[in-house]
Amino acid sequence: MNNTQTDSDAFLHGFWYVAAVAGDVKRGKTIHRTLLGKPVLIGRDATDAVFALSDTCPHRGTLLSRGMFDGETVECPYHGWRFATNGQCTTIPSQKEGQRPQADDIRARPYPVRESNGIIWVFIGDKTDAENLPTVPAVLDIGNRFQLHLRRTFHCNIDLAITGLMDPAHGAFVHASSVWRGHRDVRDKEKVFSPTPLGWRMDRHVASGNARAYRLFLGGAPETEISYALPGIRIEHATTGKATYCGLTACTPVAADTTAVHHIMYWNIPGGAALRGLVRLIARRFLNQDADAVKDMRDGQAFNPDTMLVEDADTQIRWYFRLKKEWQQAQRDGRPFHNPIEPVTLRWRS
């Protein structure tokens, strides 16, 4: 038996991570987020532009997000040091002329930040690659406005959160329902997979017959495509020709044993606004079920048992760890990342 627990729990740097959604950050306000163990202040200035800084004052480490923000500068609540939205210190009230340091000598670390598709992304790493900013497929008549955003804390490391969510064979047991899928209702599946720059794609196919939630929501059997990409992004794009749905699920590590899972949904279904409350209930139930399932796995793996991966249902889990290892090695070697995945057809029952 192979032990699937891994020592590759280190965070992946050099990627954009979901930190918040647009509505979380009001004009003239700031919020705190912890991303990959780093404290990050995210704010929106008086012109409605989003910015991100290290959320610790360079003086004594006080959280800047606990202080005041006037739309232009952030004030530390401890000694009143003030910082512009680019991180430059503008005021040190305690310092007399000629004393060091002066404000010009001090800078809080800024983080690259982008607002796209209603999502606020923060880049964690030494070099920004704007081309790696994930985007969702265009949804007719919706543009960048998402319909729903759910956030759930998974009390586990990033690897367990990602592989728990991508697992293709748990649906009939974790998400069973008399409405959309019966308990133990498993059927033969055969899907074609292709590599993408930072991951892989389950090529477009007609949704399975036991995926009734799709049919109920979109009013028919849709064609769907699902992609996975480092550092932990899943995008699902489904369409019936008349209605379109896109779901983005992003896993953002908070700490070594905590992961924030964001599920963001876009659709242009007729009467879709009226469905928002019902869809929220269903989506929250799915996400909570996944969180509970991952917790059960975390609690079991705490005993360090021998575990295994099977063919073909667990192939995507293998891919994730191969990609993560290759990214880390490429970073150490200072060379381009090479995706080792090849096109393949996988078969399993779920």
Image (cartoon, rainbow, N blue to C red):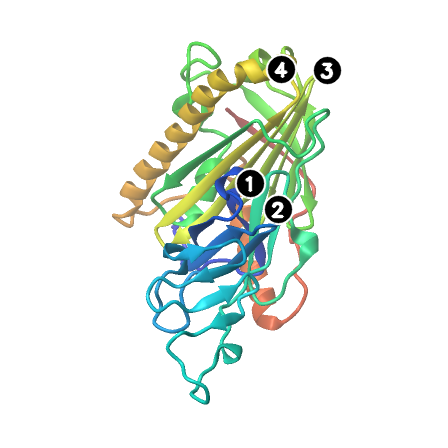
Nearer to us of marks 4 and 1 is 1
90 up-or-down from 230: above or below:
below
Q: Which residue is mark 4?
A: 218
Nearer to us of marks 2 and 4 is 2
Disc 4 packing (10 Å; few <14; some 14–19; many ≥20): many
Disc 3 packing (10 Å; few <14; some 14–19; many ≥20): few
The answer to whether residue 124 is left or right of residue 183 is right
Q: Which three-letter amino acid code belongs to the residue tagged 4?
A: Leu
Q: Which residue is mark 3?
A: 242
Q: For residue 191, which numbered disc appears in the image?
A: none
Between marks 4 and 1, how big is the CA–CA gap? 26 Å
The answer to whether residue 47 is left or right of residue 42 is right
Which of disc 4 and disc 3 is earlier in sequence? 4
Query: Mark 2: which secondary structure?
Result: strand
106 up-or-down from 264: above or below:
below
Which of disc 4 and disc 2 is earlier in sequence? 2
Nearer to us of marks 2 and 3 is 2
Q: Which residue is mark 2?
A: 115
Numbered label tally: 4
Residue shown at 40% from the left, 32% from the top = 290
